[in-house]
Image (cartoon, coloured by chain):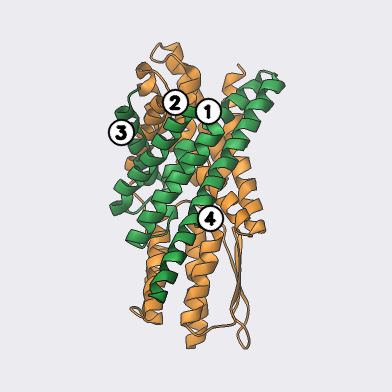
Chain colours: A orange, B green
Amino acid sequence: MSDKEMAIDCCLLAGRLMMEAGAETYRVEDTMDRMAKTQELAAIHSFVTPTGIILSPGSPHHTKLIRITNRSTDLEKIALVNAISRRLSTGEYTLEQAYERLKEIQKANVMFPLWLQIVAAGVASGSFLMLFNGLWQDVAAAVVAGGIGFIVVTFFQELTNVKFFAEFVSALAVALVAFFAIQMGIGIELDKIIIGGVMPLVPGLLITNAVRDLMAGHFMSGLSKGAEAFLTAFAIGAGVALVLSF
Amino acid sequence: MTWIMQAALSFLAAIGFGIIFNAPRKMLFYCGIVGMAGWLIYSASEMVSGDAVKASFLGAFAVALVAQIFAKRFKTPMIVFSVAGIIPLVPGGMAYNAMRHIVENDYTTAISFASKAFMVSGAIAMGLVFAEVSIQLLYRGRSKRKNAA
């Protein structure tokens, strides 16, 4: 593989990793352009959308397209890729080193352990209940609802790979837990417990990134992220509504 | 609820989201600070003005401002800090109320809740962008002055 071809692949891999980890579109394009500039690919054009990246390095190289199918939120990956691109531009890493490191990051699983994520979801739900002027008596129910909601969404996401279905079932589970907590007398305000419990599912990152992209002039990405956020919100709403309507 | 309680709870919530979104371990503490700053500003301005839209704008502005400062200091993308801080401001409660009234066939109330939720999300996004732009202007002005000197 020639040096330039490797530089192109390196840019694409960096862009793909960042996009899969949930970075803003303008940041992905910026990072790819910067990396390309350091490798003397001056005529580069990149077009980044949440579902794919097109990179045209200019003659005589071929334009390349890379497909992005899985999108999640992994802030550490964004930070790691960003650090590599920074080191590549300061000359601390050679191109080969940077490419090797990117490949390592692609394979590595840097997520927190699942149990810790579940506990974190529960704690966040409990905190939100109190921040929204909930009652102390409801905290336990909200923590359990948030934790169970997170377990359900992770499980169904792996089982079906249909994100909206997983979110729908998860919201349903949260609402059911809240409902039974009220029935058993360990909860008082149904609304607040449900709101606290579904907070870990809320597409906050998608909404803010969507508007951020729209304002930066990335209309394609902004609209598609907005659509994803809308579908997620709708799935959560439908799950909760199903329980409420009985 | 006292301010100290609110500060502690928003700190906890932001760290919780930091863990769910897999923020870098060393940065978790700072994610918590960003979340706390955003929530306290939001909460205080909501108490003064009684308007969730204005309060969300100011809260998001604070989040982005503090996140930018940390981002420059630790040379880490700003998104690492801002995401967890934004979540408490997201109008989950309003969206929930809108949904609830739709289920109860009370569409008029549902639409008013939904419009409010829409306004609040717009205000959050505006706050984020405004803070980012003003920081950029500030840094540009500073580096120009440095170059001139």
Do labels 2 and 1 touch, CB within 8 Å?
A: yes
Q: Under tag 2, what secondary structure?
A: loop
Please state which of residues B120 and A52 is positioned toward the viewer in this rendering. Answer: B120
The label shown at residue B8 is 3
Which residue shows up at 57% across the image and 61% down it? A68
Few, some or many residues within 10 Å of mark 4 (<14, 14–19, 20+): few
Residue lying at the far front of the rendered structure: B149
Please state which of residues A234 and B50 is positioned toward the viewer in this rendering. Answer: B50
- Which residue does the numbered mark 1 point to in the structure image? B93
Mark 1 vs 3, N-terminal side: 3
- Same subunit, labels 1 and 3: the answer reads yes
- Which residue does the numbered mark 4 point to in the structure image? A70
Looking at the picture, which amino acid does disc 1 mark?
A: Gly
Looking at the picture, which amino acid does disc 4 mark?
A: Asn
Quadrant holding the N terminus of chain B: top left
Would you identify the image quadrant in which residue B41 lies?
Answer: top left
Residue at mark 4: chain = A
Few, some or many residues within 10 Å of mark 3 (<14, 14–19, 20+): some
Residue at mark 1: chain = B
**Residue B26, how many percent across, how many down?**
28, 53
Residue at mark 3: chain = B
Does residue A85 sit above or below A20 in this rendering?
below
- Same subunit, labels 2 and 3: the answer reads no
